[in-house]
Image: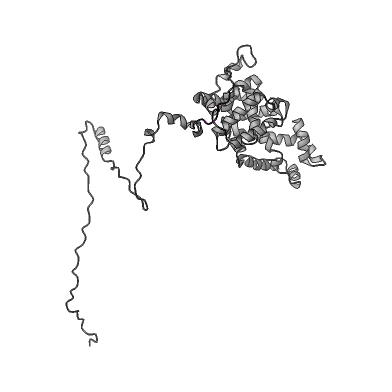
Amino acid sequence: RNIFPPQTHTPGYEPPAARPPFPRARPKVITPTPSAPPSSPREGADSWRETMSPPVRPPVARRGSCSVKQPHDISTDLMAEDQEAISTPASINTPETEDPEPVRPLADEKAPKEGEKGSGSDVKWYASIDNPGHNADLRARVRAGLNDEERRYLWPRLCGACKRSRKNTGIYQRLLKKKLKEEDRESIKKDLPRMVPHDEGKVFNEKGPEQERLYNLLRAYCIFNGKIGYGQGMGVLAGLILRYVPNEELAFWMFERLMNDPMYKCAGLYDKCVTKLRSSYTVHDWLFAKHDEELFSRFEEQEISASAYTSCWYQTRFYKLDPELGKRVLDIFLLEGEKSHIVFRVALTLLSEYRQGMMSHPEGPLNYIQDHIRCKA
């Protein structure tokens, strides 16, 4: 027996009619038509391959975007004036806001003549200075030690300063006409009388033409690289360069290469965060502990950190410690760059040379370093 009542429909209600299925769109087939019949089977294959390449689809806007970014050709926006600004800071193109300071005339940079010191057979390896990394004669000569005449000629070429100067002719004179930040000006003026303590750097500590050249170099670089500005210790390295490279403009580009070239990366030694100097402390401690664990433990017992005695070593390339040592270190550093690790090798050599005195000194290793290593290095 059927206990459910028969289904009834509401009067006037008619069920909706079934909708027809939505027609599926078929893909449009594009038949390639070659422009001309092939003259050979190989040519025909290449032409058909080109015509069968898929068409370039237009860019589609992503979700959340209101427009499609069209490709832009940068070459159309570069004018003749902008080509120079690519290799120079934007501050160079700013209007002049300060009276230009007198610039000392620069001497021409020439190779040693016959009969002079550094001439004769040395001229043969001067010619191959463009590729110093693969010049065995040059590497052996630099490691053996250069004289002052050879440094004057070779230092700018080892770091690429000569090429840099030729490509940016007149930039240095334009930098000297720009206004310097008051903060950097005060810092440079304050540090000029105390740049280098020994007799060789005495010419930069006293007022005169040499100090004016050093000020011009530091001033130009602070304008050239405004992000870093002036950092304490820059003047010692700049003074070392000016001491043996009398051409002021060439010395500026040499200083710029040491700061910004990836081979040297000296800018991190003087920026506000001294990032590279901090990393040098870490590497120094690791090498020191591995090289002489007993002496390193004595330093740790007295809480002597690497920053207490190595900051002037690494920032000035040992030139503030001893002028002859600084020149020899810079010889190898310019040739091989950071990969030589010359600064860490010299630091470990000094610690090893004076190990006995530091271990037996009654006032501790730090006092011994300040009293003896500075004088006997």
Q: Nearer the viewer, residue 131 or 361?
A: 361
Q: Position of residue 321 (x, y in %)?
A: 71, 32
Q: Position of residue 156 (x, y in %)?
A: 58, 24
Q: What span is colored magenta in the figure?
A: 96-101
Q: Residue at x 79, y 42 (%)?
A: 364
- Confirm whether residue 135 shows in the render: no
- Decide: is 49 above or below 81: below
Q: Position of residue 159 (x, y in %)?
A: 57, 27
Magenta stretch secondary structure, dominant? loop
Q: Residue furthest top?
A: 115
Q: Is residue 57 left or right of residue 244?
A: left
Q: Which quadrant holds residue 272? A: top right
- Confirm whether residue 179 shows in the render: yes
Q: Which quadrant holds residue 141? A: top right
| Quadrant of image for the N terminus | bottom left
Q: Residue furthest left?
A: 12
Q: Residue at x 73, y 41 (%)?
A: 292
Q: Nearer the viewer, residue 328 or 318?
A: 318
Figure colour scheme: one colour
Q: Residue furthest right?
A: 362
The magenta stretch spans residue 99: yes
Q: Nearer the viewer, residue 168 or 46?
A: 168
Q: Position of residue 339 (x, y in %)?
A: 60, 34
